[in-house]
Image: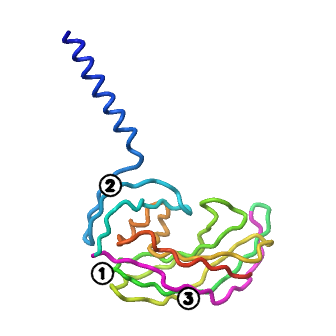
């Protein structure tokens, strides 16, 4: 009788343990820093070659919040034709101007401003390709900064136009890490600029 009770108890504990494993679809985290705290769950879902945090967290209004309020391409210039993997590609240099605002309530930390272009021959999450990366110094709450930058665009010779965009709060040397590892913000889903199409 005692053996049956013990076996029943062990079976119940095993079923509960398996159920808890099945319920975990991500990795729980807890991160507290000098700028604030957050808790929730990370889901490793690729998006444009990066891993992004799920939006299931409470907004901490004391944090900074970087956004690109305007983005325009000033010019695009042909540089050269090159061969990659047996195929011909044209290389262009584009100049742009962007305004980055900190709409949060505290000063941001240093991060990167990354430019990307759309490869028409690719599909899915990796269609956007890394172009250039520039250091972006800390920005005080309520302030904005105008950035004049350049990006290199490499596309097949048959491609006569290209989509481009910017991403603030990047960590270019560590693109496989969540963006919030660079700047902890109120919102982590508003760091992209508008998408522009330019003729080549």
**115 and 13: which one is in front?**
13
Percent across and percent down for residue 115 are 56, 76
Question: Is residue 102 placed above or below 131 in the rendered structure?
Answer: below
Q: Quadrant of residue 155?
A: bottom right
User: Is there a contact, CB below 8 Å, between mark 1 and mark 2?
Assistant: no
Q: Tell which tag, 1 or 3, sits nearer the viewer.
A: 1
Residue tagged by mark 1?
105
Q: Which residue in the protein does label 2 denote?
A: 29
Q: Residue at x 38, y 50 (%)?
A: 27
Q: Nearer the viewer, residue 1 or 142?
A: 1
Residue span colored magenta? 62-84
Image-based side of 147 in relation to 1, left or right: right
Q: Answer with mark 1 or mark 3, whichever residue precedes in sequence.
A: 3
**At numbered mark 1, what does the secondary structure look like: helix, strand or loop?**
loop
Q: CA distance from mark 1 to mark 3?
A: 25 Å
Question: In the image, is residue 176 above or below residue 117?
Answer: above
- Residue at x 59% of width, y 69% of height: 130
Q: Which residue in the structure is indicated by mark 3?
A: 97
Name the residue rendered at 53%, 78% in the picture.
Answer: 193
Q: Give the Cα separation between the discs numbered 2 and 3.
A: 37 Å
Disc 2 to disc 3: CB gap under 8 Å:
no
On the image, which quarter does residue 137 sit in? Answer: bottom left
């Amino acid at each position: 009788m005692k053996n049956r009770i013990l076996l029943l108890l062990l079976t119940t504990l095993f079923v509960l343990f398996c159920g808890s494993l099945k319920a975990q679809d991500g990795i729980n985290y807890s991160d507290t820093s000098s700028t604030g705290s957050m808790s929730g769950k990370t889901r490793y879902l690729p998006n444009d070659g990066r891993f992004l945090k799920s939006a299931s967290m409470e907004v901490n209004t004391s944090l900074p919040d970087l956004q690109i309020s305007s983005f325009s391409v000033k010019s695009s210039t042909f540089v050269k034709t090159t061969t990659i993997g047996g195929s011909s590609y044209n290389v262009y240099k584009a100049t742009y101007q962007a305004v980055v605002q900190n709409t949060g309530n505290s000063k941001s930390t240093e991060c990167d401003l990354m430019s990307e272009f759309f490869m028409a021959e690719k599909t899915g999450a990796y269609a956007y390709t890394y172009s250039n990366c520039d250091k972006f110094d800390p920005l005080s709450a309520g302030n904005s900064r105008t950035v004049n930058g350049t990006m290199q665009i490499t596309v097949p010779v048959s491609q006569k136009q290209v989509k481009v965009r910017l991403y603030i709060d990047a960590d270019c040397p560590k693109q496989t890490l969540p963006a919030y590892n660079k700047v902890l913000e109120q919102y982590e889903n508003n760091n992209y600029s508008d998408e522009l199409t330019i003729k080549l």
